């Protein structure tokens, strides 16, 4: 018992030290020049390319441990790095460097009748805590986005990706040093004990300004329940694709298969397919056949089973499940109104897609569904900051305060007001 207490106290002391260093680094980072931040990002990208063999060797250790632990195929896919994915991380850093620096950007400006000139200007948030699982590339993505937006960051990766994340973090520190920025601007928590997460959720004596959780349902639920600082998060990605009777069948098949099967383990993967009752005869079976041929398991509603028996019956829990696997639940709905009702009942407000040629259907879908991302005639797998031209993302936020959708450099800023006067006093 005493050993456990000592261990907990040791981790708390470690985390408080990390927090203090991050807060100290945040001040010079907030006023660092665009050129200096970009130089760091480009140096990081170069270091990742030069250390590719080391990163892949570290990832191999994590993959071996994952296989021994029996991780699911979708989690292993999230964890896996290869030449292309490492090159993609480096390219992502270069793309963030090419983005406009949000810090100091004048969002709005206006003059008052008394002659005061008022400006609303972007400022960094301060210190961001990022808690994530499995995906080691988040180490680079989060570090880069926080740096470009002038924020210090504390990264706490999952135990399953610890070796990969450490190898990537080494490259980030090299970039900071090369640009003359404090290396404490991007810190990786060196322990895998869950007590470190608990310490971060307290805010580390006011050092952390916002927490971003990126992982499974249990992690995000814990963060939302226990955090004493603001949180950017989504609990899960229960994403829907609605195929309207007006849709082109070939387009619908391509989109549905891609939305579900391109990468089943990402939060933008479609989990529920809704088919317009007017398209049962023309669209339903061809789309289900395309999914089955791609290796997807179908869980069908009673209406679907009446028309095409043989699929596994869906139960109520299926409509509430983020499978993150090659499984999709399928229901027939009464047109766009039925689709909207189903999505309103079961969606996690992440991403929804409509496949339709009828403009009135698209207009209703966009106007009446309140998810963070709405897509017309395209795959839900475009729900990604990089695909939005943000140079990557730190996560997808589904709340309604401050940031929503892909959280990129602009979403990692707040703002302040600058008021210019010529001697005015208030009567």
Image (cartoon, grey):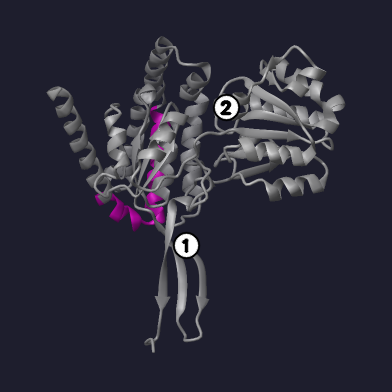
Q: How far apart are the alpha carbons under marks 1 and 2?
A: 41 Å
Q: Which residue is mark 2?
A: 321
Give left or right: position of 412 versus 166.
Answer: right
Image point 43% across, 26% down: which residue? 134
Q: Mark 1 near mark 2, Cβ–Cβ under 8 Å?
A: no
Q: Was residue 36 drawn as part of the magenta stretch in this picture?
A: yes
The residue at the far top in this view is: 68
The residue lying toward the viewer, choosing from 34 and 197, is: 197
Q: Quadrant of residue 174?
A: top left
Give left or right: position of 413 versus 299.
Answer: left
> Which residues make up the magenta segment?
24-51
Q: Secondary structure at mark 2?
A: loop
Q: Which residue is mark 1?
A: 105
Of callouts 1 and 2, the N-terminal one: 1
Image point 27% across, 31% down: which residue? 195
Q: Residues within 10 Å of mark 2 (few under 14, many from 20)?
A: some
Give left or right: position of 177 versus 13.
Answer: right
State whether the magenta stretch is mostly helix, strand or loop: helix
Residue 216 is at least partly visible in this image: no
Image point 76% across, 42% down: which residue? 337
Q: Quadrant of the C terminus?
A: bottom left
Q: Quadrant of residue 271?
A: top right
Residue 314: x %, y % from top left: 66, 20
Q: Residues within 10 Å of mark 1 (few under 14, many from 20)?
A: some
The residue at the far bottom in this view is: 427
Q: Secondary structure at mark 1?
A: loop
Residue 272 is at least partly visible in this image: yes
Residue 121: x %, y % from top left: 45, 65
Give left or right: position of 290 versus 189.
Answer: right
């Amino acid at each position: 018992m005493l050993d456990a207490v000592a261990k907990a106290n040791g981790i708390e002391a470690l985390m408080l030290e990390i927090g203090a260093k991050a807060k100290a680094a945040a001040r010079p980072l907030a006023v660092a020049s665009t050129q200096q931040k970009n130089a760091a990002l480009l140096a990081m990208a170069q270091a990742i390319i030069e250390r590719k063999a080391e990163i892949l060797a570290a990832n191999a250790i994590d993959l071996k441990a994952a296989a021994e632990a029996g991780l699911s195929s979708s989690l292993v896919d999230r964890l896996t790095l290869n030449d292309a994915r490492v090159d993609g991380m480096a390219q992502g850093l270069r793309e963030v460097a090419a983005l406009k620096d949000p810090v100091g950007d004048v969002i709005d400006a206006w003059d008052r009748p008394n002659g005061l000139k008022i400006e609303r200007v972007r400022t960094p948030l301060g210190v961001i805590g990022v808690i994530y699982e499995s995906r080691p590339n988040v180490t680079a993505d989060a570090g880069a986005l926080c740096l470009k937006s002038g924020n210090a960051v504390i990264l706490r990766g999952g135990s399953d990706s610890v070796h990969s994340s450490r190898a990537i973090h080494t490259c980030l520190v090299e970039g900071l040093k090369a640009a003359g920025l404090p290396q404490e601007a991007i810190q990786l928590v060196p322990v895998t004990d869950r007590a470190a997460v608990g310490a971060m959720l307290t805010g580390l004596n006011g050092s952390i300004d916002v927490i971003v959780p990126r992982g499974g349902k249990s992690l995000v639920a814990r963060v939302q329940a226990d955090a004493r600082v603001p949180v950017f998060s989504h609990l899960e990605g229960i994403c829907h694709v609605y195929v309207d009777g007006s849709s082109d069948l070939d387009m619908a098949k391509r989109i549905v298969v891609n939305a579900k099967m391109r990468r089943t383990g990402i939060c933008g993967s479609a989990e529920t397919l809704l088919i317009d009752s007017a398209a049962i005869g023309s669209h339903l079976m061809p789309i289900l056949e395309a999914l089955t041929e791609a290796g997807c398991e179908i869980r069908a509603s009673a209406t679907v089973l009446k028309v095409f028996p043989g699929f596994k019956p869906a139960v109520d829990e299926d409509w509430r499940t983020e499978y993150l696997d090659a499984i999709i639940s399928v229901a027939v709905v009464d047109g766009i109104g039925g689709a909207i009702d189903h999505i309103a009942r079961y969606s996690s407000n992440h991403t929804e897609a409509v496949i339709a040629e009828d403009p009135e259907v698209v207009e209703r879908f966009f106007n009446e569904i309140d998810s963070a991302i709405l897509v017309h005639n395209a795959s839900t797998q475009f729900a990604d900051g990089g695909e939005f031209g943000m140079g990557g993302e730190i996560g997808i936020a589904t709340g309604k305060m401050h940031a929503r959708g892909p959280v990129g450099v602009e979403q990692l800023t707040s703002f302040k007001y600058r008021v210019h006067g010529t001697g005015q006093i208030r009567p």
